[in-house]
Image (tube, rainbow, N blue to C red):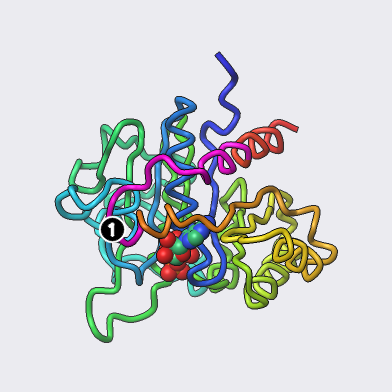
């Protein structure tokens, strides 16, 4: 049996709005499941209701998991990492979660997750009320929700780069930036690269998504200039993904899965080197 090199790794998926982060997370979860990994998917996007639940499990799934922020005492009990960088703790337990990881089966009630096969989905929380306040506490959950065991953790971030301002990548093993075919994506990728260099984060890679032609690919690569070696994969423009997203069906067989399988292989190589 091949060695499962991504076991226990935490992979943050970020990038421009609409670039394909959630779609990529769903494809990655599928491939990892096929490769016999256990997978934890953490939906860290406070603004996007139900999106990831549908992409992973389809519309047939009833309800959404109770937000993890409740497990940690609610939005008023958890502080923003900018105001208070101290690590997250459980209610009635002073041990910081990153030091004493959570045992999902023994410590977390099943209402907090949805499961299918070897994929378990958690949500940090969503914006539920007008005037609710800053979503920093939800990002602290993203940074510090660390569980025992061998699962690969895929973390779907909200659009943009605010989480870099909050030092959320500090506890990640791999940062993946997703780009579509726009200049905005390129600028965001350059920003992310700058932040990763400032924070001395080595495992930062880029994935080009929705690439419809070789010409677009080469224009985009030109714009990326000295970031080209960070590109570890390219996913074509794929109508099947659009149809899956629009119909509310879980993402199933599609040609993009092959590309994502190759990307996962490359990630296995980089963590082993
Ligand atoms: N390779 C692709 N080819 C064509 N369409 C794609 C591809 N990847 C994603 N899409 C489509 O792009 C749209 C946005 O995708 P998705 O929701 O995954 O992006 P996102 O980055 O998670 O967005 P948000 O910033 O809102 O969270 C969806 O309609 C999805 O089906
Ligand atoms: Mg998304």
Using residue 144 as the reference point, say whether residue 175 is left or right of it. Answer: right
Q: Quadrant of the C terminus?
A: top right
Q: Quadrant of residue 225?
A: bottom right
**Residue 264 to residue 207: above or below:** above
Magenta span includes 259: yes
What secondary structure is found at the residue carrying circle 1?
helix
The quarter of the image holding the N terminus is top right
Q: Toward the viewer: 183 or 94?
A: 183
Residue 184 at what x, y percent from top left? 63, 77
Give the left or right position of residue 191, taking residue 60 as reference.
right
The x, y position of residue 105, in whole percent, is: 27, 33
Seen in the picture, residue 159 relative to 12 is either above or below; the reply is below
Residue visible at 62% across and 48% down in the picture: 174
x, y percent for residue 114: 25, 44
Q: Residue at x 70, y 31 (%)?
A: 272
Q: Residues within 10 Å of mark 1 (few under 14, many from 20)?
A: few
What residue did someone put label 1 on? 247
* Residue 158 visible from this viewpoint: no
Is 164 displayed left or right of 147 in the figure?
right
Looking at the rendering, the stretch of residues picked out in magenta corresponds to 245-262
**Horizontal and vertical percent position of residue 148:** 42, 34
Q: Farthest residue toward the top?
A: 1
**Nearest the eye: 139 or 255:** 255
- Residue at 29%, 71% (x, y): give it: 76
């Amino acid at each position: 049996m091949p060695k499962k090199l991504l076991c226990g790794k935490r992979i943050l998926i970020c990038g421009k709005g609409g670039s394909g982060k959630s779609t990529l997370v769903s494809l990655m979860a599928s491939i990892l499941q096929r490769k016999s990994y256990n997978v934890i998917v953490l939906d860290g996007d406070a603004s996007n209701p139900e999106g990831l639940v549908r992409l992973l499990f389809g519309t047939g799934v009833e309800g959404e998991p109770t937000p993890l922020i409740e497990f940690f005492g609610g939005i008023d009990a958890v502080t923003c990492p900018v105001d208070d960088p101290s690590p997250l703790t459980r209610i009635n337990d002073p041990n910081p979660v990153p030091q004493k990881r959570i045992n999902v089966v023994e410590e977390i009630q099943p209402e907090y997750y949805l499961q299918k096969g070897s994929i378990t989905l958690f949500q940090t929380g969503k914006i539920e009320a007008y005037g609710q306040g800053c979503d920093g506490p939800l990002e602290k959950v993203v940074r510090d929700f660390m569980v025992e065991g061998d699962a690969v953790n895929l973390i779907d971030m909200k659009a943009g780069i605010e989480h870099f301002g909050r030092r959320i990548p500090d506890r990640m093993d791999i940062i993946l930036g997703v780009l579509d075919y726009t200049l905005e994506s390129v600028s965001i990728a350059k920003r992310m690269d700058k932040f990763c260099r400032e924070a001395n984060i080595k495992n930062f890679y880029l994935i080009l998504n929705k690439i419809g032609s070789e010409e677009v690919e080469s224009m985009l690569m030109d714009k990326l200039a000295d970031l080209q070696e960070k590109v570890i994969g390219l996913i074509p423009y794929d109508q099947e993904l659009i149809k899956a997203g629009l119909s509310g069906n879980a993402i199933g067989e599609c040609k993009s899965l092959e590309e994502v399988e190759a990307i996962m292989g490359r990630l296995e190589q980089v963590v082993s080197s």
